[in-house]
Image: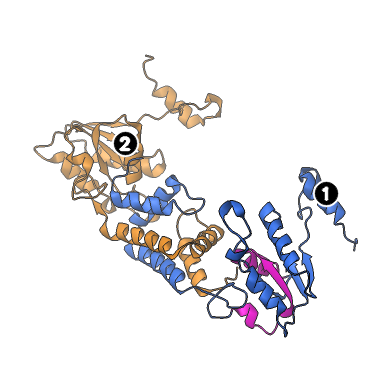
Chain colours: A orange, B blue
């Protein structure tokens, strides 16, 4: 496509690098900004710049935080005996939104993926082990809440093996049929897991 | 939703003001930027800021331009006897992409919409009339290429009435069945127009 201005072209190229945004959507967004008040663009770009330069990560769990330690790690109301291992900050938000978990977290920052050149050393696995091996640790249970993909399973397997000498119970979130979905439409692996992993009817 | 940081919340609020982007998509984009290199965000925001502060509009047709006059108005290859009136810069790009039009443009910057408080004075209608009434004008035909909506039709009607004393042929783009669409699925107004506006079979 030919653009009427180099400025538009540059902006479209930059915006379309974002995930899930193609050239057409990028152009629509860019032309929207051109049409709107200049302050609108400035407040958008300022908030993104501030975000990127001022963002901090919790020194304990590596979740996004406003301070050196995040609200969850600082809170006295959270159960410090359970630790939930997740891939990303989005996963923390998703689990928090369920309201079903009162323990703490550890954000790996990704999963082991040799295809993308991500090995264990690129992730916060070493610091997880350190956190769990400390003399004064209160942690009794580690919940592995990783995606049921090849990479997620590999990462879970790797962490579990690393922890085999520590007196910590390692669990994984339940796999099974989604609530509200039809049995006949679920894939056989999920359905199979939901049978082998069946629970007491209550 | 609760965000782990005020910076994330601010950024999500700003990004979700863009058209077609909700809070969930905004969060995904924002977390993507946090994960990526800092320079990525800086080059994105810089290109948007540059766009908004340096963008120019052609003094003749009001299309987006890198200079005071746009490439189409400056070009000697374009037919200066035909002028196409469009709502927005996107429309110019869309028509240019067809490769079917060699005339010039006039970008109104919107359509008359009393609901949104947009009257004729908010649009580049006065300058269109001035452009057409000039002694030395070469323009012989004016094509109204506005959307077939209530607002587009109102604007077309308003412009046509304003021009009734000028020796200029006023035409409108053809309305009819889209190429490749099924007759039975098109709405009755479009189908009706395609019959009343039938053309010679060639």
In the rendering, at what x and y percent does residue B86 appear? Answer: 66, 65
Question: Which residue lies under the disc numbered 1?
Answer: B192
User: Regarding mark 1 in the picture, which secondary structure is present there?
Assistant: helix
B82 in magenta: yes
Question: Which residue lies under the disc numbered 2?
Answer: A96
Q: Which of the two residues, A195 or B49, is positioned nearer the viewer here?
A: B49
Side (left or right) of A166 relative to B170: left
Q: Quarter of the image holding residue A149?
A: top left
User: Regarding mark 2 in the picture, which secondary structure is present there?
Assistant: helix
Q: Is residue B182 visible to us here?
A: no
Mark 1 neighbour density, 10 Å: few (under 14) some (14–19) many (20 or more) = some
Q: Which of the two residues, B10 or A75, is positioned nearer the viewer here?
A: B10
Where's the C terminus of chain A, which quadrant?
A: top left
Where's the N terminus of chain A, which quadrant?
A: bottom right
Q: Quarter of the image holding residue B146?
A: bottom right
In the rendering, at what x and y percent does residue B124 appear? Answer: 61, 69
Real-space Cα distance between discs 1 and 2? 56 Å
Q: Which of the two residues, A11 or B56, is positioned nearer the viewer here?
A: B56
In the rendering, at what x and y percent does residue A104 appear? Answer: 23, 37
Q: Is residue A177 visible to us here?
A: yes
Kindly identify the residue that appears in the image at 74 percent across and 82 percent down.
B138
Q: Which of the two residues, B34 or B26, is positioned nearer the viewer here?
A: B26
Q: What segment carries the magenta color?
A: B70-99
């Amino acid at each position: 496509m030919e653009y009427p201005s180099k400025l538009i072209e540059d902006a479209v190229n930059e915006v379309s690098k974002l995930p899930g945004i193609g050239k057409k959507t990028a152009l629509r967004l860019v032309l929207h900004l051109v049409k709107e008040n200049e302050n609108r663009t400035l407040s958008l770009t300022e908030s993104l710049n501030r975000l990127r330069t001022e963002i901090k990560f919790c020194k304990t769990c590596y979740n996004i935080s406003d301070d050196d330690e995040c609200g969850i790690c600082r809170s006295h109301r959270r159960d410090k005996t359970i630790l939930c291992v997740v891939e990303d900050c989005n996963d923390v938000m998703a689990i928090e939104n369920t309201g079903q978990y009162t323990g703490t977290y550890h954000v790996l920052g990704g999963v082991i993926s040799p295809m993308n050149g991500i090995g264990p050393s690129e992730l916060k696995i070493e610091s997880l082990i350190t956190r769990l091996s400390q003399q004064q640790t209160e942690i009794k249970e580690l919940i592995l809440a990783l995606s049921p993909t090849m990479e997620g399973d590999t990462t879970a397997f790797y962490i579990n093996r690393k922890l085999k000498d520590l007196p910590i119970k390692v669990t994984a979130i339940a796999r099974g049929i989604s609530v509200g979905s039809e049995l006949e439409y679920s894939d056989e692996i999920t359905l199979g897991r939901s049978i082998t992993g069946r629970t007491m009817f209550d």
